[in-house]
Amino acid sequence: MSQMAEKIEKLVKSISELSVLEVSELVKELQDKLGVSAMPVAAAPAAAAASEEAPTASGGVQTVTMTASGANKIAVIKALREINQNLGLKEAKDMTESLPAKVAENVKAEEAKTFAEKLKAAGATVEVK
C-alpha cells in the first residue's frame, strides 16, 4: 500500500467516526479554508454515512420530533437549516407547518439533545424519543 493510500485510509476512518454535527462543522471549515462551496447533493452522502455510523457507536439512538413551531417561525426555520444543511428554505418552512415533523432519526443521544436545545431556543416544542 502506498503512503498516499495509507493517508487517505486514515482520513476516511477518522471522518467516519465523527457525528453528523461534527462532519457538518468539518465541511464548513474546509469550505472556508479552501474557498469553495459544497453542493447539497455532495454533502448528503457524507451526512447519511455518518448517521448510519451513529447507532453502532453509541448503542442508543433517538428521534427528534418537532410538535409545535412556536411564535417565531423564522428562528425555528434557521435552526432546522442549521441542524440539516440539506434542507432548503421551502422545505424547512414546510416542516414548521406540517407538524408533528421528524427533524432527525437514529441519532446519538448527545446529538438529539443538541438538536432539541437548538429548536427549543428558537421557540419550538420538541419531543425526543
Image (spheres, rainbow, N blue to C red):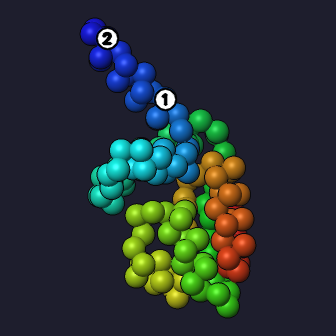
In this rendered view, identify the residue nearer to me: 127 or 29: 29
- Looking at the image, the residue that sits furthest to the top is 1
- Find residue 125 and report its horizontal and vertical position in percent: 70, 78
- Is 21 placed left or right of 5 in the picture? right
For mark 1, give the secondary structure.
helix
Q: Residues within 10 Å of mark 1 (few under 14, many from 20)?
A: few
For mark 2, give the secondary structure.
helix
- Find residue 71 and report its horizontal and vertical position in percent: 67, 91
Residue pointed to by mark 1: 14
In contact (CB < 8 Å): disc 2 and disc 1: no
Q: In percent of the image, x 55 and y 74: which residue is there?
A: 78
Q: In percent of the image, x 68 and y 57: which residue is there?
A: 114
Amino acid at the residue labelled 2: Gln
- Find residue 61 and report its horizontal and vertical position in percent: 62, 50
Disc number placed over residue 70 in the picture, else none:
none
Q: In percent of the image, x 40 and y 29: which residue is there?
A: 12
Q: Residues within 10 Å of mark 2 (few under 14, many from 20)?
A: few
In this rendered view, identify the residue nearer to me: 111 or 102: 111
Residue 118 picture quarter: bottom right
Q: Earlier in the sequence, mark 2 or mark 1?
A: 2
- Is 90 placed left or right of 98 in the picture? left
Residue pointed to by mark 2: 3
- Quarter holding the N terminus is top left
Q: In percent of the image, x 29 and y 17: which residue is there?
A: 5
Instruction: Give the answer, above or below, for where 45 lies relative to 69.
Output: above
- Quarter holding the C terminus is bottom right
- Is 125 placed left or right of 106 in the picture? right
Amino acid at the residue labelled 1: Ser
Measure the C-alpha gap from mark 2 to mark 1.
Answer: 17 Å
In this rendered view, identify the residue nearer to me: 44 or 100: 44
- Find residue 49 and report its horizontal and vertical position in percent: 42, 44
